[in-house]
Image: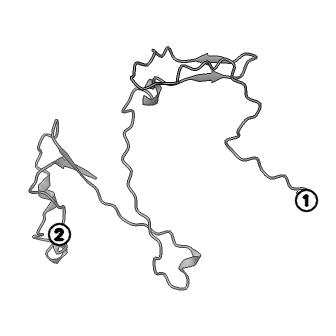
Amino acid sequence: MYVTKQKDTERHLTHSTNNMDSGKPLVDFSKFFDGENLEQEDLVLWFNLGMHHLPHTGDLPITLMSTAQSSVVFSPHNYLLSDPSRQTVQQVELDLTGEKVVVDTYKKKSAVCKAPLTIDADYSDFQIDYTVNKMPKPALCANC
């Protein structure tokens, strides 16, 4: 993976006929790196995305690749100080662990909007008599 300054003259890192003359390729990617400063510049990320195929019994008796996978994921790391959804003004937490329901509105201010909003409800009488499991329970087997 390489990062260079964006230049309109450098649109492709290779050419379909580059392998014809490796001594003088039509696009010489090594010339893209000329020591320029990348600070506060538009950048281009050059990366090579290959395919990989994990052989499986479905490939037999021929080894033609019927499936192949390629992917790339770019995600920021420690980009924000915390989860940005914590800044939402409609956030309400209901603590159902005690005898009484504890409601936390995270000190939200009253919304000012021309459209009618119904987020100022009283949740203190909220009751629940069931739970929803995130993971399914394993099936019970009489013969196990």
Residue 64 lies, in percent from the top left, at 46, 81
Query: Three-letter amino acid code at disc 1?
Result: Asn
Q: Quadrant of the C terminus?
A: bottom right
* In this rendering, position of residue 102 left or right of residue 106: right
Residue 34 lies, in percent from the top left, at 10, 49
Marks 2 and 1, how far apart in space?
Answer: 65 Å
Q: How is the image coloured?
A: one colour
User: Label 1, on which residue?
Assistant: 143
- The answer to whether 140 is drawn above or below residue 51 in the figure is above
* In this rendering, position of residue 84 left or right of residue 20: right
Mark linked to residue 15: 2
Residue at the image position 42 percent from the left and 29 percent from the top: 84
Residue 20 lies, in percent from the top left, at 16, 77
For the residue labelled by badge 2, is the local secondary structure a helix, a strand or a loop?
loop
Query: Which badge, 2 or 1, comes first in the chain's sequence?
Result: 2
* In this rendering, position of residue 123 left or right of residue 50: right
For disc 2, the neighbor class at 10 Å (few under 14, some 14 to 19, many from 20) is few
Residue at the image position 57 percent from the left and 77 percent from the top: 58
Residue at the image position 53 percent from the left and 79 percent from the top: 59
Res. 129 image quadrant = top right
For disc 1, the neighbor class at 10 Å (few under 14, some 14 to 19, many from 20) is few
Query: Three-letter amino acid code at disc 2?
Result: His
Residue at the image position 16 percent from the left and 75 percent from the top: 17
Q: Nearer the viewer, residue 93 or 128?
A: 128
